[in-house]
Image (spheres, rainbow, N blue to C red):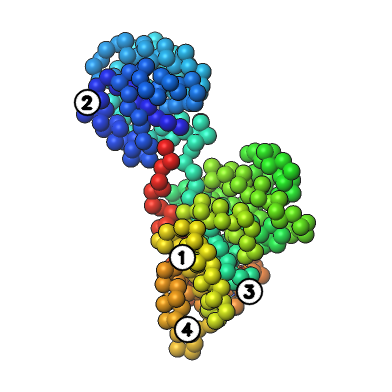
Amino acid sequence: MQIIVVSSNPGDERVATLIRLLQHLGHSPLVVAGWHEGALGQNHSRSAKLIVVTNTSGDVTVAEEAIAHLDASHNGSFLIYVADTINPEIYKRLIKSERGDWISWQALPQELSDLVSKVMNLAGEGELAKVVSFFPSAGGVGNTTLAAEVGYWLASENKKAGLKVAAIDLNFQDSSLADLLDLEPRLNVSELIDRPERLDDRLIDIFTSRHSPTFDVFSGPTRFDGRQKAYSAVVFPLLDALSKRYNLVLIDLPHHWSPWVDNVIQGSDGIVITGGNAVPAVKQLIMRMKHVEALEVPHEQIKVVVNKCDVTFFGKIPRKADIDRVLSRGSPIYVPRDSVTANEAANTGRPMLEIAPRRSVCKSIRGLANWVQTVTSRPSVSAN
Ligand SMILES: Nc1ncnc2c1ncn2[C@@H]1O[C@H](COP(=O)(O)OP(=O)(O)O)[C@@H](O)[C@H]1O
Ligand SMILES: [Mg+2]
């Protein structure tokens, strides 16, 4: 939603502060001097906008013009009037329209952010989730396990901040994410394949397996229907819907490549490439790394995870120096093999990080979770 700041006095210090506040919130407001200027005049009837009308002079006609404009527009635009005072009659009309509000210059720093996000949410443009894809270089490397552990950990670590995390298993033929956490698999994509537009809030609720109040899982029952190709129609509506509901979405990608996989990778804020440390496994990791690089994903958004590493008696990881060298651009994290903990986790349906947080496998996974947290806390490039 484009934000337009109407100001007859754009040089005013308070207006400059307002613009800085909006920019800080990730918006690029367009500043116009009056109602009939530029984009506001031409495009006003076409798409909904957030119009911020500033009054720095105390001239009462500014508010009157603003409300007349709001009354005349029927495109879902919202109006914020910023002035030291407001005539009670006009204030009433603004509130009654449900498309307008007033903020005093003094309260601007406290109130602007909440109001802007409220308007964006109303317009269906709330902040979108950060997305991290887990991309396996082979089957069985622990991709699903790592996505589940990281999701569990970040949700519980950021519970107070209210971070809402979703993990979705896109291995439609053999999803295992829900099973791993002993949840009922509820994502039924076959309901959507022919009519992806059916996906609404109610259906998302039905598809949700709740692990905790801040961690939800989307994973389906195993099915053999040979409709892999058709799934591409479902993947993007699903991810769009999730990114509106959650702050962080972790995607468990299949290791069999499908055309939609590349688009998912390109739309992600971070990519975790998972594999093993045996010689053929490292070759597969290199292939995956090259694939992701060819999609022009910046190196700082890529993390290679070498999982199930056999550790020597002296705590050394065989071939580590070689792997570090050939995969240096993915700055690898090594996760030791710990079959006892992994099996106990699988048998109890609880994350390893919950049942055995002090094991070294868990320390390494926390290192990965920290990377995911860092790569998703960078401000994203705003599209508008
Ligand atoms: N670090 C580890 N040490 C030992 N076993 C592991 C480790 N990570 C995963 N596993 C086990 O490997 C098996 C495959 O894991 P999974 O996450 O399903 O792999 P993928 O999703 O890549 O096919 C599971 O039985 C899991 O418990
Ligand atoms: Mg898996």
Q: Label 4: which residue? A: 319
Q: Disc 2 designates what residue?
A: 12
31 vs 320, left or right, is left
In this picture, residue 19 sits left or right of residue 317: left
First in sequence, mark 4 or 1: give its number. Answer: 1
Q: Quadrant of the N terminus?
A: top left
What secondary structure is marked by label 4?
Answer: loop
Name the foreground residue: 168 vs 217.
168
Circles 4, 1 touching at the beta carbon (< 8 Å): no
| Residue toward you, 348 or 96 | 96
Pointer 3 residue: 343
Q: Give the answer, above or below, for where 80 lies relative to 134.
A: above
Q: At numbered mark 2, what does the secondary structure look like: helix, strand or loop?
A: loop
> Would residue 153 be visible to someone looking at this image?
no
- Contact flag, marks 3 and 4 (Cβ < 8 Å): no
Which quarter of the picture shows residue 240? top right
